[in-house]
Amino acid sequence: MTTSDKILIAPSILSADFSILGQEVTAIDEAGADYIHIDVMDGHFVPNLTFGAPVVKSIRKCSKKVFDVHLMISPVDPLIDDFVAAGADIITAHVEAGPHLHRTLQHIKSKGVKCGVSLNPHTPIESIKHVMDDVDLILIMTVNPGFGGQSFIPLLDKIADAREMIEATGRNIDLQVDGGINPETAKQVIKAGANVLVAGTAVFKDGPEHYASHIKSLRGDS
């Protein structure tokens, strides 16, 4: 693998207690999260509505960890600058979120942040073949985006294909998986080639005193 051998855990704050969101971000930071995964949904591209750039800006002071912003919005291009200004370190857009994927990725990179591309369960891996030189992260969705707490779709062949594509570039590209991740499915996606795991319910269940142990179990630490 060209990426780090360490498995990175990116708790999704979609499953946090929104009434104390800043405290929750600090808690997962202190519990060992590698990235803070921020799911932005517009009620149009996906059937749910979460929050915008002002909320991201307000919680930026709560952690120095990587803010991994997953934009489930369409059109995505007009809002990229707002999330960069709010403190995003990585911005991930979906293949279908605009008319010109290459232009979207170039826009993100021009702002000095890392760029990711996300594939819904039905989106073929071949759709990103010609932008591999532009991405820093590939996100394989193992649920249909829009809601937390869904069951894992076993797209292990797709994850393996993405890993093969990454290896062929010789570049250090993260392979992230999001959807239905728990200690059991984590083992499966890691074996298939993922190195960044997004988890909401599996981290935030049981309260802050359990965040550290949940993160360790996802990573495969004893």
Image (cartoon, grey):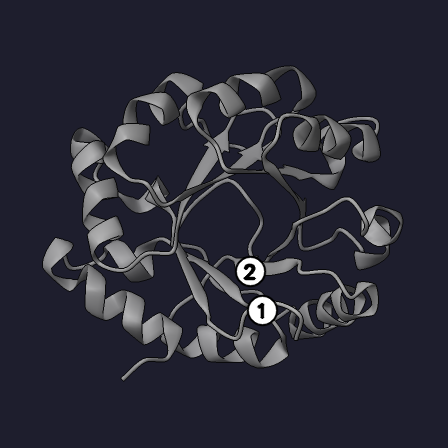
Q: Residues within 10 Å of mark 2 (few under 14, many from 20)?
A: many
Can you give x and y, in whole percent of width and height, for residue 160 in the image? 71, 74
Q: Secondary structure at mark 2?
A: strand
Can you give x and y, in whole percent of width and height, for residue 182 in the image? 38, 69
Seen at 66% across and 58% down, the residue is 173
Residue 78 vertical position relative to residue 41 in the rendered view, above or below: above
Seen at 86% across and 56% down, the residue is 126
Seen at 67% across and 68% down, the residue is 159
| Residue in the foreground of this view, choosing between 221 and 159 | 221
Please state, as top left, top right, bottom left or bottom right, where the N terminus lies in the image.
Answer: bottom right
Location of mark 2 (residue): 177
Q: Which is more N-terminal, label 2 or label 1?
A: 2
Please state, as top left, top right, bottom left or bottom right, where the C terminus lies in the image.
Answer: bottom left
User: Can residue 75 be seen here?
Assistant: no
Q: Secondary structure at mark 1?
A: loop
Location of mark 1 (residue): 194
Seen at 60% across and 27% down, the residue is 73
User: Can residue 51 be seen here?
Assistant: yes
Left or right: where 76 falls relative to 147 = right
